[in-house]
Amino acid sequence: SPTAYFAQFKLNTDAVGMVTASHNENGWTGIKMGIEKGLTHSPDEMNELKKIVLEKKFTKGKGTYKEIKGFKEIYIKIILKYK
């Protein structure tokens, strides 16, 4: 999770999605998604998203995919500065 939040700010993007094995209680595990920096969807928001997907009520749009090679190393280098 920390790497995903770091990436939001480092790459200047709002949306985030991550697969987790969280220590948090049920309802906050499995996948985290967010649309604003530093904030993830609550269980209610995730249920709303699930309903949209299951009912196939998508909006039309366009997106992109960009692989950032070596991002793990960028993250590690920066956090080690604060060790």
Image (cartoon, rainbow, N blue to C red):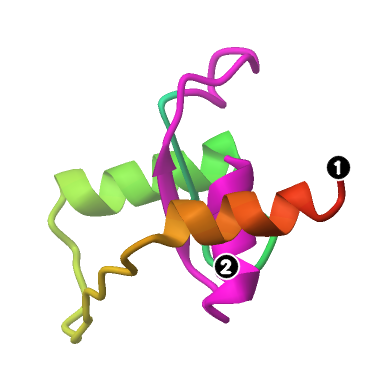
Residue at the spot x=45%, y=29% of the render?
20
Compared with residue 34, is residue 24 higher up or lower down, i.e. above or below? Answer: above
Q: Secondary structure at mark 2?
A: helix
Q: Secondary structure at mark 1?
A: loop
Compared across the picture, whether 39 is left or right of 17 comes to right
Near mark 1 (Cα within 10 A), the count class, few <14, some 14-19 or many ≥20, is: few
Asked if residue 36 can be seen in this view, the reply is no
Q: Magenta span covers which residues? A: 1-29
Compared across the picture, whether 56 is left or right of 31 comes to left
Compared with residue 63, is residue 28 higher up or lower down, i.e. above or below? Answer: above
What is the x, y in percent for residue 57? Answer: 19, 63
**Magenta span includes 68:** no
Quarter of the image where one finds residue 2: top right
Quarter of the figure that contains the C terminus: top right
Which badge, 2 or 1, comes first in the chain's sequence?
2
What is the x, y in percent for residue 41? Answer: 57, 48
Instruction: Name the residue beneath numbered marker 1.
Output: 83
Residue at the spot x=19%, y=68% of the render?
58
Image disc number at residue 8: 2
Amino acid carrying label 2: it is Gln
What is the x, y in percent for residue 66? Answer: 25, 75
Compared with residue 47, is residue 16 higher up or lower down, i.e. above or below? Answer: below
Residue at the spot x=31%, y=65% of the render?
69
Residue at the spot x=61%, y=49% of the render?
76
Q: CA distance from mark 2 to mark 1?
A: 22 Å
Image disc number at residue 11: none
